[in-house]
Image (spheres, helix red, strand yellow):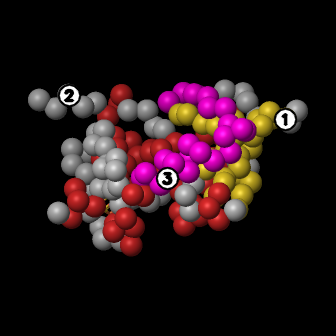
Amino acid sequence: MDTFRASEISITGTLIWYYYICHRQVWLMSRQIAPEQDNPNIVLGRYIQEHSYLREKKEVSVGSSKMDIIRVLEEGLVIGEVKKSSRYQKSARMQLAFYLKELKNRGLKATGELRFPQEKKKQQIVLAKQTEEELDRTCQHIKIIIREEKPPPPQKKQLCKNCAYAEFCWA
Ligand code: SF4
């Protein structure tokens, strides 16, 4: 018997990140079908996340999400998200915006800083009304995806060749 209950899944920043990359990944993550942990991209991404900006980071949990607070200013918090590359900027921006919204819903003012240490780039993120509305629509759509009994079919895209689920999708 399938004991999975979509209603019990909390939407996290990680699901938002996957949503803008591949809807199939959203479904797989929701079923806790973990990607190959020794995939070189996952290993490198984890290394960069764990070893960048160590002096500044302070990880906190808000709702079901974990985020790094990098500065506390009079005008509010600054939270950061470190990514391996700026290739999936939209995903990264929406993930960070989701964290800003989580904080806003709890009455906390915050801005975000996206960091790409390998490219020596930073990008400031402010939560705009339009982005909040888009996040609401995205969360609704994520719920629809994870309620399905089967994952959306795989769709060949450039990312597939580096994706940790590649074997699962294409073997
Ligand atoms: S291999 Fe391609 S289709 Fe499969 S989860 Fe990864 S990105 Fe999506």
Residue at (57, 54) in percent of width and height: 83
Which residue is disc 2 drawn over? 3
Contact? badges 1 and 3 (CB < 8 Å): no
Which residue is disc 3 drawn over? 45
The x and y percentages for residue 153 are 24, 60
Q: Which mark is residue 85?
A: none
Reply above or below: 67 against 96.
Answer: above
Q: Which of labels 1 and 3 is toward the front?
A: 3
Write down the quadrant of residue 167 in the picture.
Answer: bottom left
Which residue is disc 1 drawn over? 73
Residue at (63, 47) in percent of width and height: 52
Question: What secondary structure is marked by label 1?
Answer: strand
User: Is residue 169 toward the left or the right of residue 121 in the image?
Assistant: left
**Which amino acid type corresponds to the residue marked 2 in the rendered image?**
Thr
47 and 68: which is toward the camera: 47
Q: Earlier in the sequence, mark 1 or mark 3?
A: 3
Q: CA distance from mark 2 to mark 3?
A: 32 Å
The magenta stretch is 42-64
For label 3, the crowd category at 10 Å Cα-Cα, with few meaning under 14, some 14 to 19 and many 20 or more, is some
